Image (spheres, helix red, strand yellow):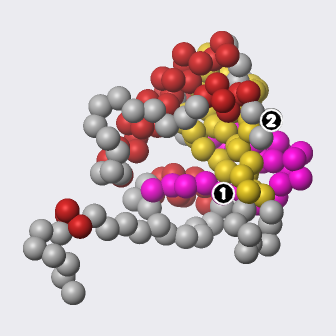
Amino acid sequence: MEIRIREATEQDIEKLLTFEQGVIEAERPFDPTLKDGHITYYDLPGLMASNQAILAVAEHQGELVASGYARLEPAKPYLKHEQHAYLGFMFVDPAHRGKGINRLIIEYLIEWARSQSIHELRLDVYVENGPAIKAYEKLGFSKHLVEMRLNTEDQPGGLNL
């Protein structure tokens, strides 16, 4: 199976918007804070226009089958690195999962980050999303922080202290 990884173009927007809804649909079960109904996560034209980001797609036989981006972000002033690349919009069409396409996208994004002299990469994944965590660990990522939340509306009668 021949997969071609390339930078996204404006002609890809319609399919990328479909991928975005696929990401949101996959993440809804993990995130009760997402609004109901149609939402969007990404400024796709902005990512494509930015010289601080790259939006990559995977093509198979002329059809887009996956996406991902890397965006340069400033690091907190107390960290050793000044910038890192944040990876997001990792999506593979369900019909093409399990074929190593996500790995190809990430390798492409890592090479782009290295070309920008960036060696620290970050991404977010829901703690309950075991398959995604395993996939990222296979690529060398490791767990770093766990974000925790509390919604006091979920605690009728107060906290159990």
Give residue 99's position: percent from left, percent from top.
60, 36
Q: Residues within 10 Å of mark 2 (few under 14, many from 20)?
A: few
- 27 is higher (above) or lower (below) than 84: above
Which quarter of the picture shows residue 16?
A: top right
Q: Foreground: 107 or 15?
A: 15
Q: Is residue 12 left or right of residue 159?
A: right
Three-letter residue code for mark 2: Asn
Q: CA distance from mark 1 to mark 2?
A: 19 Å
Q: Residues within 10 Å of mark 1 (few under 14, many from 20)?
A: some
Q: Is residue 150 left or right of residue 89?
A: left
Give residue 105's position: percent from left, percent from top.
69, 38
Q: Quadrant of the C terminus?
A: bottom left
At x 75%, y 33%, the residue is: 50
What is the total number of numbered labels drawn onto the structure image?
2
Residues rendered magenta in the picture: 101-126
At x 42%, y 37%, the residue is: 24
Q: Is residue 119 visible?
A: yes
Give residue 60's position: percent from left, percent from top.
66, 20
Q: Is residue 106 magenta?
A: yes
Give residue 159's position: percent from left, percent from top.
20, 78
Q: Is residue 100 visible?
A: no
- Give the foreground label among 1 and 2: 2
Q: In terms of sequence position, does the residue under pointer 1 or pointer 2 come before the other? A: 2
Q: Which residue is mark 2?
A: 51
Q: Is residue 84 left or right of residue 46?
A: right
Q: Which residue is mark 1?
A: 122
Q: Foreground: 29 or 58?
A: 29
Three-letter residue code for mark 1: Arg
